[in-house]
Amino acid sequence: ETGVTQTPRHLVMGMTNKKSLKCEQHLGHNAMYWYKQSAKKPLELMFVYSLEERVENNSVPSRFSPECPNSSHLFLHLHTLQPEDSALYLCASSQSRRWTDEQFFGPGTRLTVL
Amino acid sequence: AQTVTQSQPEMSVQEAETVTLSCTYDTSESDYYLFWYKQPPSRQMILVIRQEAYKQQNATENRFSVNFQKAAKSFSLKISDSQLGDAAMYFCASTSGGGADGLTFGKGTHLIIQP
């Protein structure tokens, strides 16, 4: 595998389910990001991790719980979601948190909440 | 806070023709970067071109070039000799040292290539 990978690519879940999204980067980067891409809205930054420490949480509801066990893996744990949480969830990584570092994106997980 | 605005939800161009996608931005920072990303149907967001605000020269990458008007806070993308593989969503984005981590994106422009 190369670049940034995300699994699953598609996920359908009920509002009472618990599921997790996984992101893995094979680039040796130290910063990882979760973005939400909703229809007709700009991508929204959700969380930022640097060296496995969460450094940003953009007022995301607690039903989204990120986890970064090491610098290569990032998870987004989901529970009791709402239909409006249906969106494409993109993971990205960069060499560091420096704003000048390029971010590399994964293909995303298309989430549908019923 | 930074904002990025793309006023064209959709654009269409004939194959081999030239198309320009518009983007305006607002920032209080003096040092920032601007980007154009391409998101094809496969959904993988790919960096097309990057412009550093302190550089006056417009960035160019093969058939892709930008028209960076700093005073007007305008950053348009020109695609020359359009190809079928250029069909995608195009997002304008910005980042700066004084802003939050991560990129600020526009809503995107859907580019259709007519054969």
Image (cartoon, coloured by chain):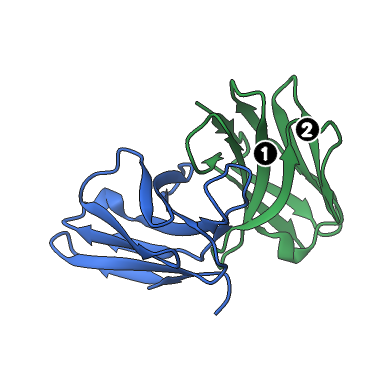
Left or right of residue B103, residue A16 in this image: left
- Tag count: 2
Please tell me in which quadrant of the rendered image residue A13 appears.
Answer: bottom left
In what element is the residue under mark 2? strand
| Residue marked by disc 2 | B68
Q: Return the residue nearer the eye: B18 or A25.
A: A25
Chain drawn blue, letter? Answer: A
Residue A34: tell me if it is visible. Answer: no
Residue A98, percent from left and from top:
57, 44
Q: Return the residue nearer the eye: A112 or A47.
A: A47
Q: CA distance from mark 2 to mark 1?
A: 9 Å
Residue A69, percent from left and from top:
33, 65
Question: Which residue occupies 86% across, 58% down?
Answer: B16
Query: Of the residues shown, which amino acid type is indicated by label 2?
Result: Phe
Residue A38, percent from left and from top:
41, 49
Query: Of the residues shown, which amino acid type is indicated by label 1?
Result: Leu
Question: Marks 1 and 2: in contact by CB < 8 Å?
Answer: yes
Relative height, residue A35 to residue B69 (above, below): below
What colour denotes chain B?
green
Question: Which residue occupies 59% across, 20% down?
Answer: B28
Q: Earlier in the sequence, mark 2 or mark 1?
A: 1
